[in-house]
Image (cartoon, grey):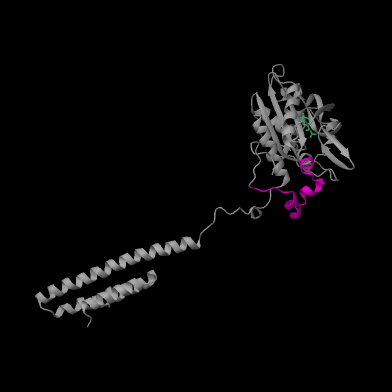
Amino acid sequence: MDTLDTLQADLLATIAAASDSAALEEVRVSAMGKKGRITALMGDMRNLSPEERKARGAALNAVKTAVESAIEARRAELKTAELAAKLEAERIDVTLPARPESLGRIHPITQTIDEIVAIFADMGFTVAEGPDIETDFHNFTALNIPPEHPARQMHDTFYLPPDADGGARVLRTHTSPVQIRTMLKEKPPIRIIAPGRTYRSDYDQTHTPMFHQVEALVIGEDIHMGHLKGTLLEFCRAFFQIDDLPIRFRPSFFPFTEPSAEIDIGCARKGGEMKLGNFGDWLEIGGSGMVHPKVLENCGIDSTKYQGFAFGMGIERMAMLKYGIPDLRTFFEADLRWLKHYGFVPLDQPNLAQGLTR
Ligand code: DAH
């Protein structure tokens, strides 16, 4: 039979040697389980006289307490060690550089829209949106392009089946209907841009059936063409990051503006290459003008009190010029190699404070 001292020494040694929680639990069961060594000794006390039992009981209880607290202490030790091992195994070095490749790439159109929004937001513009499927009214009529107007032919419109009430529907041919939606909804002063998809039935080297425009609309009581030109100048210089980039207005016609002007920016064309800047040559980037009084009235805005300017630009053209992308059609071919080459790192969100591009 074990003497209690050797039993205690033996158990404490096994406890100390237990290398994990499972081994420790085995020791506990071997001592204090149903068939455990201490349990057995407790059972043996039945045969003792009351006095002997008292002394033996006290001695056994002391062993039991010592073993229990040793198990408890070892359990805490093992827990700490196991946690430390787990933390070590799952360690992450947060100072390692991120792997942006695994996040994919931002498409140049998305990047360009983000940049345009950042610049106009800085000038106090908010972003407005409208649906890709437009009513004939918003896309044409309210913009002073009545049925049979020759401007309708120029738009190569995708016509859709009429809606449930027989109303004519189209895929919007420009972002200008967002002007109408905004003016019908909001009271002046208005200062919005509306970037988005537009559609025309046309496909060649410089046209895709889906493309993007950004519209701008400013309505107030004392808005004039100087504001239009100043806004465009400010925007183009920030976007292309060319401090002395010149802008020129060329007289033009749009049904929804009067007067109307095409927007040209300075460039040089040499040996098939295009360079932006103050070089004497010119390149068109969009249309603009003072909002036609009829358009204001169509939207319930008093044209004797308010006037405003608007412009629209092609986003693909802006992206091609800024990032040297030669072919328009490649934008929509979903070629991963192209996207890897011309795409942008997702973690670099454009903002004016840090500069717009990488
Ligand atoms: N909506 C015209 C187009 O698609 C562009 C345009 C011209 C927009 C003049 C305007 C504007 O807001 O004032 O060709």
Please identify the residue farthest to the top as the structure is shown. Answer: 304
State the residue in front, 58 or 154. 58
Magenta stretch: dominant SS? helix
Image quadrant containing the N terminus: bottom left
Q: Is residue 219 magenta?
A: no
| Residue drawn at the location 47% of the way across and 60% of the way down | 87
Image quadrant containing the C terminus: top right
Picture quarter with ligand 1: top right
Percent position of residue 164, x then y? 70, 40
Please identify the residue farthest to the bottom as the structure is shown. Answer: 1
Percent position of residue 137, x then y? 74, 32
Number of numbered tags placed on the structure image: 0
**Residue 119, can we see it?**
yes
| Residue drawn at the location 24% of the way across and 78% of the way down | 6
**Residue 166, can we see it?**
no
State the residue in front, 124 or 347. 347
Residue segment shown in magenta: 319-346
70 relative position to 154: left or right: left
Q: Is residue 3 above or below residue 214?
A: below
Dividing the picture into quarters, in which one does residue 157 lie?
top right
Dividing the picture into quarters, in which one does residue 35 lie?
bottom left
| Residue drawn at the location 66% of the way across and 26% of the way down | 190
Q: Is residue 333 magenta?
A: yes
Please identify the residue farthest to the right as the structure is shown. Answer: 271
Percent position of residue 119, x then y? 68, 34
Q: Is residue 288 above or below residue 172?
A: above
Percent position of residue 295, x then y? 74, 25
